[in-house]
Image: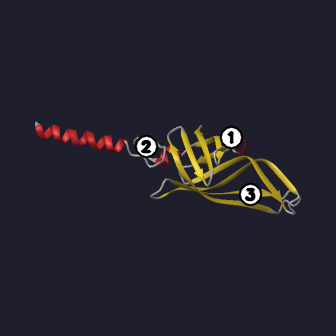
Amino acid sequence: MAHFFTRLFFLVVTLAAVSACTGYQDGPAINGKSADVKLIRTWRVVAASENGAAVTTNYVDDLWTFNEDGSLSHTDVNKSISIPPYTQNSVGPKIATGFWSFVEGTAGLEVFYAFEFNDPFNGSVTYRDEYQEVYEIQKFTQKELWLLIGNVQLKLEAL
């Protein structure tokens, strides 16, 4: 009987240790769901700061959709586009497509995406604005995703 209680004690201690593990600075304990399953959905930016100062208006309502096949779409509500000869500026919602992956062995999320848009004066000319970024995941739950890139922190919520 003592052997049973010893095994039970080690099982409880092991489960407690595992449940306290986190891969993110302010992240949750492991809850049995893989990171892929938690990430695959649409997220909306609800707050942003740069060097501690609020810059939410630059990002608010931007959307990130992560798909199971590794593809993504990113809607930038206030995307600024300068069209050659760089006298034609346009600001408004633009949708980019690309790919995402977790950076193995780190709390990193790597994204590659590109906005494509046509020249308003010559429809046969298409411009491509590409981005490759690695975000540090600071908090990651079913409903919240906090990302840091450089001095910019984004707080996203699941839709």
Quadrant including the C terminus: top right
Comes first in the chain, label 2 or label 3: 2
Front: mark 1 or 3: 1
List the residue tagged with mark 1.
Answer: 61
Residue type of the residue flagged with mark 3:
Glu
- Residue 33: give its label: 2
List the residue tagged with mark 3.
Answer: 116
Residue type of the residue flagged with mark 1:
Asp
Q: Secondary structure at mark 1?
A: loop
Residue type of the residue flagged with mark 2:
Lys
Comes first in the chain, label 2 or label 1: 2
Does the residue at mark 2 contact the one at mark 3 (Cβ under 8 Å)? Answer: no
Q: Is residue 11 left or right of residue 38?
A: left
Q: Going 32% across and 44% down the picture, which residue do you hit?
A: 17
Q: Secondary structure at mark 2?
A: loop
Image location of residue 55, percent across then percent down: 69, 44
- Residue 21: give its label: none
> Vertical placement of 129 versus 20: above or below?
below
Q: CA distance from mark 1 to mark 3?
A: 20 Å
> Vertical placement of 128 versus 155: above or below?
below
Mark 1: few, some, or many residues within 10 Å (few <14, many ≥20)?
some
Q: CA distance from mark 2 to mark 3?
A: 35 Å
> Vertical placement of 99 versus 159: above or below?
below
Quadrant including the N terminus: top left
Q: Depth check: 119 or 151 in front?
A: 151
